[in-house]
Amino acid sequence: MTYNTTSMEDEDRKVVFQMPENDKCVDCGTAHAEWASVSYGTILCLDCSGVHRSLGVHLSFVRSIKMDAWSEKQLQVMKSGGNAQCRAFLQKWGVNVDYDRSKIKERYESPAAELYREVLKARIEGRPEPTELPEQKEAANAAPMKMKMEGFGSTPHPSTLPKKKKKKFSKKAIIAGVASAAIGVGAVAIQLSKNNR
């Protein structure tokens, strides 16, 4: 499947930025934001776009308004979404929409945010818009595992890993292992000397 992509044209940009509340970041209110979450049809500042990227593309697909290529479908989402519409939808379902960057993860992992993503998809695809919150998955309700993380990756610090028990071998087992290895080496040496005659 191929997608026609193009940079966001000035006309499209004008339409998007003239939508209610699209003159600022949907999450923190910073003016002149130039990033977008295609998943919600919203405008983001650089800092909040980084937080959205950390959520994963399954929750928020982030694009630069000026630098990235846009498919026609992505442009349609931006024109049918908008900051004011997204915030009103989430607020209707009891999600905190205060301008607070620390609430981004909680906000967009909510069932209401999942429903809004599905509403926008249905709108673009010409399907009936869903009206019920999706059921929460059990993993979302599980308590997060707490580990001390270091560095740039997600590898846990060695001090947080469970200690492995060392196997103890008796002296007899060690001697038997060494003897077996010696016999094996001796047998190979005898075979080699026979082949060289």
Image (cartoon, rainbow, N blue to C red):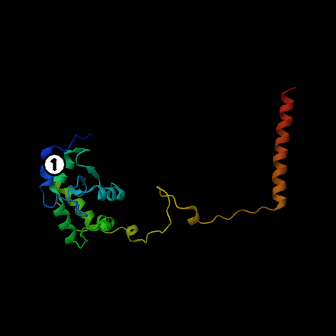
- Residue in view at x 14 percent, y 44 percent: 10
Q: Is residue 69 above or below residue 128?
A: above
- Is 139 positioned to the left or the right of 32 in the image? right
Toward the bottom, the furthest residue is 94
Do we see residue 34 in this rendering?
yes
- Locate residue 170: give its quadrant: bottom right
- Locate residue 46: give its quadrant: bottom left
Q: Is residue 125 above or below residue 21?
A: above
Q: Is residue 6 above or below residue 116?
A: above
Residue holding disc 1: 13
Q: Nearer the viewer, residue 18 or 185?
A: 18
- Is 192 positioned to the left or the right of 25 in the image? right
Residue 144: percent from the left, percent from the top? Answer: 44, 69
Q: Nearer the viewer, residue 62 or 111?
A: 62
- Locate residue 57: give its quadrant: bottom left
- Residue in view at x 22 percent, y 63 percent: 29
Residue 165: percent from the left, percent from the top? Answer: 67, 65
Residue 183: percent from the left, percent from the top? Answer: 85, 45
Toward the front, the furthest residue is 31
Do we see residue 37 in this rendering?
no
Residue 50: percent from the left, percent from the top? Answer: 33, 56
- Point out the image quarter for the C terminus: top right
Q: Amino acid at mark 1?
A: Arg
Q: Nearer the viewer, residue 28 or 142?
A: 28
For numbered disc 1, what is the local secondary structure? helix
- Point out the image quarter for the N terminus: top left
